[in-house]
Amino acid sequence: QGRLVESGGGLVQPGGSLRLSCAASGMVFSIRSMGWYRQAPGKQRELVGSISTGGSPTYVDSVKGRFTISRDNAKDTVYLQMNDLKPEDQAVYYCTAGGTPWWGQGTQVTVSS
């Protein structure tokens, strides 16, 4: 059974930055696309972006130009660099591995002045 563990969440002011990590185990990481999702209070879980096995990222319009997804196959880890954070970005952030039912436990991102 695959395991995913997110980390790096915390409290930041609007305009600040944060880098999230998702460490994978129990799977062949290099053959999986990886996705980042988030869920804010009262809202459905929504896609933030994804990264292909070859390292090509894609993003939803609301985070384009501010967020960057990358991966390090040697470390079995995917990252979400978040810049110019807005209050609307506040949510629990989750990662998932493509083609699997596996999700991490989530990490809380709070954006507040």
Image (cartoon, grey):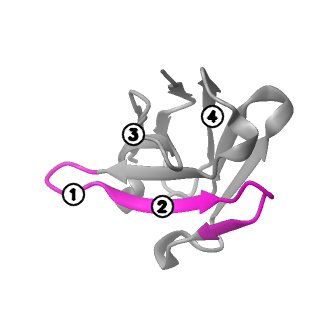
Query: Considering depth in this image, is 52 or 46 the residue closer to the camera?
Result: 52
In percent of width and height, residue 102 lies at 43, 35
Q: Amino acid at mark 4?
A: Ser
Q: Residues within 10 Å of mark 1 (few under 14, many from 20)?
A: few
Q: Amino acid at mark 1?
A: Gln
Asked whether 43 falls inside the magenta stretch, the response is yes
**Residue that mark 4 sits on:** 21
Q: What is the secondary structure assignment of the residue under circle 4?
A: strand
Looking at the picture, does residue 42 appear above or below residue 75? below
Q: Which residues are magenta?
A: 40-58
Which disc is residue 48 wearing?
2
Looking at the picture, does residue 4 appear above or below residue 70? above
Which disc is residue 101 wearing?
3
Disc 4 to disc 3, C-alpha distance: 19 Å
**Residue that mark 1 sits on:** 44
Q: In the image, 95: left or right of 70? A: left
